[in-house]
Amino acid sequence: NAGVTQTPKFQVLKTGQSMTLQCAQDMNHNSMYWYRQDPGMGLRLIYYSASEGTTDKGEVPNGYNVSRLNKREFSLRLESAAPSQTSVYFCASSGAGIKRGYTFGSGTRLTVV
Amino acid sequence: KNEVEQSPQNLTAQEGEFITINCSYSVGISALHWLQQHPGGGIVSLFMLSSGKKKHGRLIATINIQEKHSSLHITASHPRDSAVYICAVSMSGGSNYKLTFGKGTLLTVNP
């Protein structure tokens, strides 16, 4: 089915470990995003990529890096995981122009112990 | 100061009731989104609005740009409507549509 695919769905890391969250979309969308969702805080933007070849920081970028590998794929890397990065992570994409909607991935539940 | 405010935070209704969730924002926007998230689940886009009103089944979304306010209505509510409803806006200008979110409204519909 068309949409945004995120992997993995669940992950437990030890403090200091690294990992990469993968995201791919097959809707030919230009823009891709990584958000985190925390209780009481709502969803907050970590990084985004307005188009292939560009990435920019969002509201809460510290501790993360991203790569826009091609138009389809946008990965999020935690170099040295911390307990404060325990969260649910959502990848999303949107098309060019205001009439193109937003599509979210199913989320990655990450626990850092 | 949160740029997107939703009310109420929590809402409990009986099956069949008419439900309204409100969203106010303080910035110029290019679009407003209503999203649905079931417990432990992913996020689904219900509506994207830049003006007026949209309807899909029992769901209706309205927006008043001058008043910076939007409402999501659910007619004949059903227990399967129980979810968190999230209002989000994309700011005016720019070529991307990164979203700023409200904190969500937890809706519980009892049979």
Image: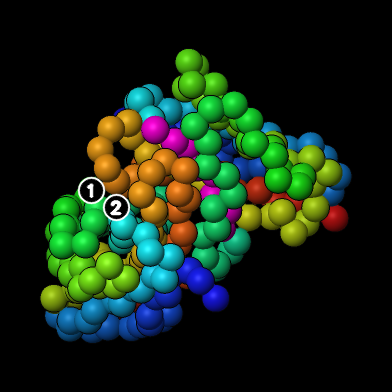
Element class at badge 1: loop
Q: Is residue B74 magenta?
A: no
In front: B97, or B34?
A: B97
> Magenta stretch: dominant SS?
strand
Please name the amino acid that badge 2 sits on.
Answer: Leu
Q: Give residue B86's position: percent from left, percent from top.
A: 52, 46
Q: Residue at x 14, y 76 (%)?
A: A80
Which mark identifies residue A59?
1
Q: Give residue A59's position: percent from left, percent from top.
A: 23, 48
Callout 2: chain: A
What segment carries the magenta color? B30-37
Residue A99 visible, this orientation = yes
In front: A98, or B14?
A: A98
Density class for disc 2 (Cα within 10 Å; few <14, some 14-19, many ≥20) is: many
Above or below — where is B86 with respect to A82? above
Q: Residue at x 43, y 79 (%)?
A: A9
In front: A18, or A57?
A: A57
Q: Give residue A101's position: percent from left, percent from top.
A: 47, 50
Q: Quadrant of residue A84?
A: bottom left
Q: Is residue B34 magenta?
A: yes
